[in-house]
Image (cartoon, grey):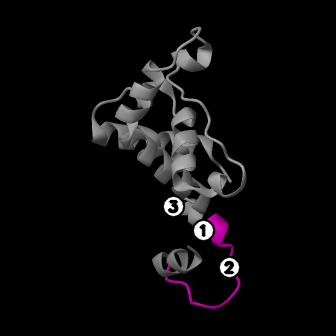
Amino acid sequence: MNAGVRAVANLPRYGHFDLSELRSELRMQNINQITEKTILLAAWKKRGEFLARNNLLVGPSTRSHAKGNIPQPVQKGLLGKMVASSIDCGWNRLPSHIKYETDAKKAKTLITNHVCNTIKF
């Protein structure tokens, strides 16, 4: 990431520069934002599976169930580091209006705006 910021800003490969400030001035996303955006996009692409899984849930209608969330996967040990677990958890972090969006281009824009406005690390 730092090499990319240096390349875009035409800075030398070595030397002390405040790359975080430069990255924010160039309006580039940081690593946490890129990771979250990737997870949320992958979760949105699997929305058919998640909505079907939510509809199969039995029991009382809870706030979480009404939002379209699915039960959290087991995240102990290596299961918590699996991509599938991250995507399942990412689905629950998506806002409802993005979960039910059908247009891929619009969903990608909504996810990007959501990530840029919520994650400021």
Q: Is residue 32 above or below residue 102?
A: below
Give, as a three-letter code, the residue at label 3.
Met
Q: Magenta segment: does it hold 19? A: yes
Give whichever of 104, 1 is nearer the camera: 104
Q: Are marks 3 and 2 in contact (CB under 8 Å)?
A: no
- Residue under label 1: 22
- The answer for how far apart the CA atoms under marks 2 and 1 are is 8 Å
Above or below, comparing residue 41 to residue 23 in the picture: above
Residue type pointed to by label 2: Phe
Question: Picture coordinates of residue 113 (x, y %)?
Answer: 47, 41
Question: How would you rate the neighbour count of disc 1 (Cα within 10 Å): few for under 14, some for 14-19, many for 20 or more?
Answer: some
Q: Which residue is mark 3?
A: 28
How far apart, in angstroms, are the residues tagged by discs 3 and 1?
9 Å
Q: Position of residue 90 (x, y in %)?
A: 54, 41
In the rendered structure, which disc, 3 or 2, sits on the residue that comes first in sequence?
2
Q: Helix, strand, or loop for circle 2?
A: loop
Q: Which mark is residue 17?
A: 2
